[in-house]
Amino acid sequence: MTKQTALITGITGQDGAYLARLLLDKGYRVVGLTPRRGSDTMWRLRELGVLHDIEIAYGDVTDMGSVLGILGRFTPNEIYNLAAQSFVGASWDQPTHTADVNAIGTVNVLEGIRQRLPEARFYQASTSEMFGMAQSPVQSEKTPFYPRSPYGVAKLYAHWITVNYRESFGIHASSGILFNHESPLRGIEFVTRKVTDAVARIKLGKSEQVTLGNLDAQRDWGYAADYVDAMWRMLQQPDPSDYVIATGVTTTIRDMCRLAFEHAGLDWTRHVVVDTGLFRPAEVDVLCGDASKARERLGWRPTTGLAQLLGLMVDADLRRLA
Ligand code: NDP
Ligand code: GDP
């Protein structure tokens, strides 16, 4: 049997790296569409030991010519669109760029599939940020959306254009509405990794404190390695659909800090400082997902609780800094 080929946009990101490893383990040929950058962006792929097993294709989802060229050259069977300006906080500083990559980038990939590879299966990296000011205490595929940031608004366009291409052209296009997921490979700008990096620095005597914003927000945090498995499962279904992927447990930033510092034997109240300047112009106060549909149809369930996840992250940061 010929090898299945998967194309991952955003392969140098947290999820791209874990997904590349998962697909390589399953015997796929893995191609990563990635923009040529001025500095090295391959550290995650290197850390997972997969950099030399994948193929890099330089391109940009906002550049239709490069998308069409890469689809034509590699003819992937599965396309995972993970490319994004993924940091909510930065989306107020760069709203147009965020829309270009997260919204227009997605329709570029879908249009490329429609023109060149209509049989290919497509995964869109949608997000719980689309629920924003949540219209229900627990959010499922049926909960109405109310995004609260330029990031969430752009991702909502990408979600609906995915549904639209499925309904208009019969493309096997699925949208994973993933709640926050973290790992030792999470970007340092996100609150969990900012905290675990700080815990390691404080433990090693390299720092005294960390400055955070709103500690009252609540998030449903899972482990990225579990979540990329859900992406793959969606594309193995006979029919495309939309799925919430979440743990169903929500925790405040404050309690997340306590757990991360406790893992290193530290008292968080002695090291965390709040700066209201870090509060967001509009906040997503609480997210908590209901992943029953994924459990029933995909046989997917999370394996890692928050305390265990933060332990993995703190230990990895201690190793990096030691
Ligand atoms: P990361 O920020 O770690 O990765 C984003 C990736 O997109 C990077 O490889 C980045 O490359 C790439 N990228 C950025 N701009 C472009 C572009 N114009 N063309 C091609 N590639 C580009 O995000 P995650 O891995 O955490 O998330 C993966 C996806 O899932 C994102 O779409 C994110 O919005 C979404 N998501 C993430 C959640 C989470 O909790 N992690 C929750 C829900 C959804 P470079 O580094 O070179 O900029
Ligand atoms: P998001 O859910 O995708 O925005 O993921 P983040 O990890 O960036 O933020 C999660 C929550 O943590 C949000 O409600 C932020 O307001 C809150 N938060 C509090 N302090 C910080 C901080 O210093 N950095 C970040 N990134 N978020 C913070």
Image (cartoon, rainbow, N blue to C red):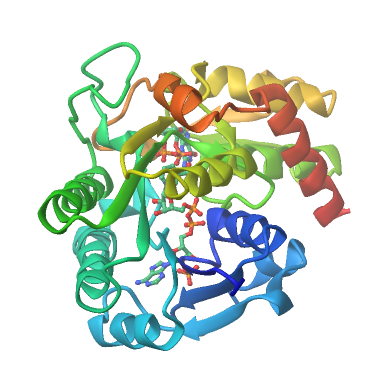
Q: Which quadrant of the structure image shows residue 119?
A: bottom left
Q: Is residue 141 left or right of residue 35?
A: left
Quadrant of the drawing holding the N terminus: bottom right
Residue under the image location 47 percent in, 76 percent down = 34
Residue sitting at the far front: 1
Name the residue at 71% across, 59% down.
25
Query: Whole-percent x and y of residue 214?
Result: 42, 27
Towards the viewer: 116 or 276: 116
Considering every residue shown, the one lying at the far left of the view is 168
- Residue 8, image x, y percentages: 48, 66
Camera sees residue 272? yes
Residue 189 at x, y = what percent?
52, 50
Compared with residue 71, is residue 254 higher up or lower down, i.e. above or below? above
Which image quadrant for residue 145? top left
Q: Nearer the viewer, residue 66 or 29?
A: 29
Please determine whether, in this image, residue 253 is positioned above or below residue 17.
above
Q: Determine the residue located farthest toward the right in the rendered image.
A: 322
179 horizontally vs 272: left or right: left
Instruction: Say which residue appears at 14% left-offset and 50% top-offset.
Output: 164
Which is more toward the observer, 319 or 145?
Answer: 145
Up the image or down, 224 lies above or below 307; here it is: below
